[in-house]
Image (cartoon, rainbow, N blue to C red):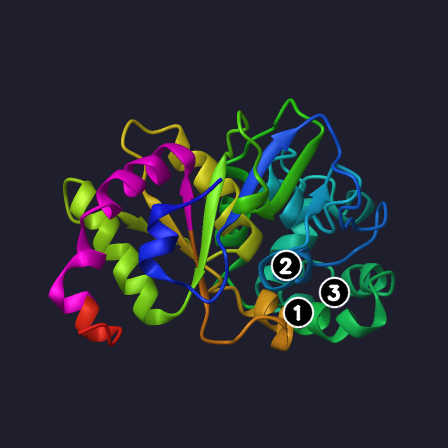
Amino acid sequence: MKSITAERLRPDFEPVALLWSDTKPDGALQIKPHAQTCIMPFFAQVVTKGKTAVFDRDTCGCPGARAGLGFGNGYYDAFSGAGTAFMAAFFVKGAESSRDPDAYCAIVQHVPKKEQAKFIRGERLHSSTEKAERFMTRDLPITDIAERYVIVTPLSQVKPGERPVVVIFVANPLQIAGLVTLVGAIREGTDPVRVPPMAACQQIGAFVYDEAKMEHPRAVLGYTDLAARANVGAALPEHMFTFAVPFSLFMEMEEEAEDGVFDGPIWRGLVGEV
């Protein structure tokens, strides 16, 4: 599948497609079953090396990615049933925020050693455990797909007849400004882009799935997740962000991009074409 938007934008990396499928692609990257890890380094390999990655309920890496990719809410039974109380403490100040610090630290002993310090001190994504609990149980949009697999692949690898659920641009700040302008030219109102301050996988999955249900879906700006950036490291340039859109919005962008902001003198001057 080609993209007029990408042709006009000229990002450093090809856009990425996210698809749901019951067929596992041959040769795809996949996490080991039940391994505790971040999916974003796998996403980075799709972006920078043209690989394909596949995920299912047993190979989604962590509770947040289970929710992010669309395999239901992974927080309730996270870490062998420690559940939302454990995760809420982790999302705040770790052991300090736990109702039972000793029990919390005992669970942390089963986390990979390189991650244990982070769990003890907490990710500090929320100001209170109550807020963190609300995020997991009420605020996070949950999708439980019928298909077995979530596939992440370069857009050019999408075959005729296949329809991505999400298209993801990985772009620098100037290109993000261009994409925001493009979507703003299409959408009524003043809020065409959603910026949920949550996990990077949820910014390319769960929140985009949620927008896809809307009559006029918005884009989702992502890769603002500090933990994901730490996990990915230099595999993606640090000035990059994700700009993920439901497929229906992508098609609207394609139409507008044929003679839109990227053909105007301001954009062309900024990118050195005039």
Whether residue 121 sits left or right of residue 141 in the image: it is: right
Q: Is residue 110 above or below residue 147?
A: below
Examine the structure image and report whether residue 248 is included in the region drawn in magenta.
yes
Which mark is drawn over residue 231? 1
User: Could you say which is closer to the camera, residue 101 or residue 37?
Assistant: 37
Residue 154 is a magenta residue: no
Which region of the structure is painted magenta? 244-267
- For label 2, the SS is helix
3 vs 1, front mark: 1
The residue located at (25%, 47%) in the rendering is 257
Mark identifier at residue 40: 2
Please tell me how crowded label 1 is: few (under 14), some (14-19), or many (20+) other residues with Cα within 10 Å: some
Q: Residue at x 65, y 40 (%)?
A: 151
Q: Residue 156 in the image: x percent, y percent?
A: 54, 45
**Does the CB distance between marks 2 and 3 fall below 8 Å?**
no
Q: Which residue has dot 3 on it?
A: 101
Q: Position of residue 163 (x, y in %)?
A: 51, 29
Residue 50 relative to residue 218: left or right:
right
